[in-house]
Amino acid sequence: MTEKPAPTMGSLSARLRNIVWDTDLALVPRWHAILLGLVRFGHAIVRSVASEQLTLRAMSLVYTTLLSLVPLLAISFSVLKGFGVHNQIEPLLLGVLEPLGDKGIEITNEIIGFVENIKVGVLGFVGFALLFYTVVSLMQKIERAFNHTWHILHERSLGQQFRDYLSVIIIGPALVFSAVGIMASLMNTAVVDMMSAIQPFGFLIKTAAKTAPYVMIVGAFTFIYMFIPNTRVNLRSALIGGFVAGVLWNITGWIFASFVVNSAQYAAIYSTFATLIMFLIWLYLGWLILLIGASIAFHDQHPEYVTATRRQMRLSNRVREKLALLIAYLIGERYYKNGPGWTADGLAQRLSAPMDATESILSALEQNNLLVRTAAEPPEFLPARPLETTDLADVLQAARTVDETSYLNPDRLPREAPVDTILGDIEAATVATLQGRTLKDLALSGVASSDDPIASMEKLNE
């Protein structure tokens, strides 16, 4: 009797892959489906960290933070001084750098010293402009990192950056510290003291006081995930990302604090540089946690990206053409119905298409003056010219030329008569098929009948 060969690592990996990804979650018990869903989700997050350069982006943000931290605190300090809560900056920095132990206190004192020594009146116009530029550059890098995670190709406009960034830099700290001050005042009132002596109110108040810092951390992360990406983020997804990031922040802080306590040998090796090295490592971990939370929020809002392998956006010509026609149809139909404009995220969800693929086609239509992007937030897309004068052939042409460049296009390739003849026949057949058809015909074909763009387009072609 022959013995069965022992399973190899490759066969075990393939079997595990089949169990996780090939199982229909609708056919298994609920607890089994939840467990497999969590495994798939975790796999997607790990792949995102490994393949989407989150570690490199975190390193880049560390460098920018070193340049921008003092100017950022200087601007916030000037604003908070007017509200009388500027003394709260030092406790906040101490809380953020608490895992560094005594080194955190040393770094906080140095940073506060730098901030207090900045004389805005001495800087002059150029110096003051550079001060703001370093702060804005930090916000731009954060937005680019988040937009990369969310597969967003367009950043905020200059006007939107000026408005949104200044609101975060100037108004945000004042609101946060004012809220902290109000909370501290409420906790010290006679009413709270009286209720603390009564059970179970005393236990609840003590529990709330202990959990308040963690709730504020989760709230801060949630606000960042909703505000920074140049798209509309669902509260549920932002809250999930903020909660996980907050838990990671506290766990990492506890581990890092234990490491700092037992790192006397590093201080002996690096001497005075040990403090700076610890500070850089903690900054890097903080930014990495922030980006991981953003990836979690993205995958929760876009579960179509939770796949066995990383999706590469490689669209065939047929997919590009159909996406372009579908997008043009939906925008035109909504326009004639006097409804609100479509956003990129709304179109992606309506068409069950990846966000980056939808953004690519929208950009192509926009570059060919078929669509225009509004100044709303998030931006909506409207027809750039009258639909009755826009030929369907223009939409197909925009989809076909989306990736063409000046150095690689059909005109730069060698000319061969047989090939040129075939391509000419195809082009002539396309022009003959679409002769006289406009985007108005396409849009109105579904205004009074079907809400399904595919069915309406097929009806138009009959």
Image: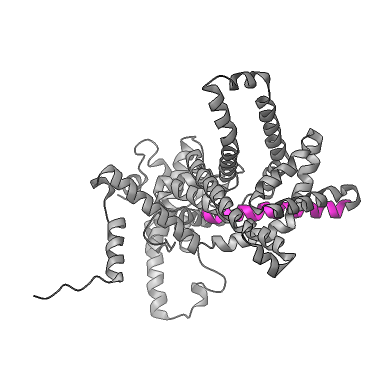
Is 154 or 19 nearer to us in this picture?
Answer: 19
Is 313 or 165 nearer to us in this picture?
Answer: 165
Residue 239, percent from left and from top: 51, 41
In which quarter of the view is residue 100 placed? bottom right
Does the magenta segment cover residue 131?
A: yes
Residue 269, percent from left and from top: 69, 70
Is 373 or 370 nearer to us in this picture?
Answer: 373
Q: Is residue 63 left or right of residue 202?
A: right
Q: Is residue 56 left or right of residue 134?
A: left
Placement of the N terminus among the 4 image quadrants: bottom left
In which quarter of the view is residue 66 placed? bottom right
Measuring 79% from the left and 47% from the top, which residue is drawn there?
A: 74
Judge whether 423 appears above or below 456 on screen. below
Q: Is residue 332 left or right of residue 280?
A: left
Does residue 460 show up? no
Residue 182, percent from left and from top: 69, 28
Q: How many marks?
A: 0
Most common SS among magenta residues: helix
* Segment colored magenta: 124-152
Is 45 or 123 nearer to us in this picture?
Answer: 45
Residue 306, percent from left and from top: 40, 54
Measuring 80% from the left and 34% from the top, which residue is drawn there?
A: 84
Does residue 184 show up? yes
